[in-house]
Amino acid sequence: MDSVPPVPVESPAAERRAERELMVLTVENLAATAGVRGRLAVAPRVLDAMRRVPRHLLVPEEARAQAYADRALPIGHEVTISQPFIVALMTDLADVSPGDRVLEVGTGSGYQAAVLAALGAEVRSIEIIAPLAERAARDLAALGYPVRVRQGDGYAGWPEAAPFDAIVVTAGAPEIPQPLVDQLKPGGRLVIPVRSARGGEDLLLVRKAADGRVTRESVLPVRFVPLTREP
Ligand code: SAH
């Protein structure tokens, strides 16, 4: 008896592949145009991770149509998530390899955490707004990303899980939090927007050398929602 081949059913996570591809092309073009740090590219493995993460399933329903535009998106609670180019740049600067232990401060939608997890990192993320932490933890688990999400003030880091190969802060900090520098491994990278005198923030790459020496490099002027503190 002839069998009829099953109609392929796309999983929700596989939907909108063409839009993701366009988003990645836009990121590549922006990187080439901006020539950030004299480099004309974002690492291919970062772009590949962004091809795989279904950004539309990590933003609220109202923002879904716009999920793949290269722009920041509102996710409620006066929070916006970064445009894909900035996510790509920060992920590239964090220089994450499979198995790296990574901390994110500012979970928001969970999108940046998912991109880090898609690179094979062991990811922990801290979010100060409880409903956002809960929603991101639920959505990341539903998509199969093994990210540990905790509600709290990420200024203090996650000491029990330290040290980290990389720490990515996705809210604008008044200064570089010393606990985060302390929780970096030798050779570790901290990527953080820090408020500048001009207004807005400078995206900084802070490195801890093998001998413990800390250096910082200013990469790009950016604009983030503020890092707030728990009283
Ligand atoms: N990375 C997120 C976007 C983050 S927007 C994403 O991919 O969707 C910045 C987030 O940082 C907001 O959700 C805000 O509530 C959170 N935040 C601000 N101050 C914080 C703090 N001290 N500790 C942890 N999270 C904080």
Image (cartoon, rainbow, N blue to C red):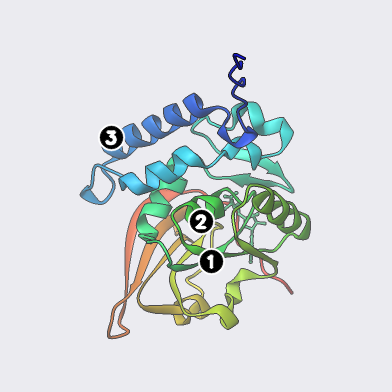
Identify the residue position indicated by label 2 in the image: 117
Residue 67's place in the image compared with 173, above or below, is above
What crowding class fits label 3: few (fewer than 14 Cα within 10 Å), some (14-19), or many (20 or more)?
Answer: few
Q: Disc 2, disc 3: CB below 8 Å?
A: no
Q: Secondary structure at mark 1?
A: loop
Q: Position of residue 181 (x, y in %)?
A: 45, 77
User: How many other residues sit within 10 Å of disc 1, few (<14), some (14-19) or many (≥20)?
Assistant: some
96 vs 128, nearest the viewer = 96
Q: Residues within 10 Å of mark 2 (few under 14, many from 20)?
A: many
Mark number displayed over residue 174: 1
Q: CA distance from mark 2 to mark 3?
A: 28 Å
Q: Residue furthest right?
A: 131
Residue at 62 percent of width and 51 percent of height: 144
Q: Nearer the viewer, mark 2 or mark 3?
A: 2
Give the quarter of the image for residue 160. Answer: bottom right
On the picture, is 153 further left or further right than 170?
Answer: right
Q: How many marks?
A: 3
Badge 2 vs badge 1, beta-carbon distance below 8 Å: no
Q: Position of residue 188 (x, y in %)?
A: 37, 73
Whether residues under marks 3 and 1 lie with C-beta atoms below 8 angstroms apart, the answer is no
Of the residues shown, which amino acid type is indicated by label 2?
Ala
Q: Establish if 205 lies above or below 47.
A: below
Relative to 200, is 95 on the left or the right?
Answer: left
- In three-dimensional space, the C-alpha distance between marks 3 and 1, rounded to whole angstroms, equals 29 Å
Q: Which disc number belongs to residue 5?
A: none
Q: Earlier in the sequence, mark 3 or mark 1?
A: 3
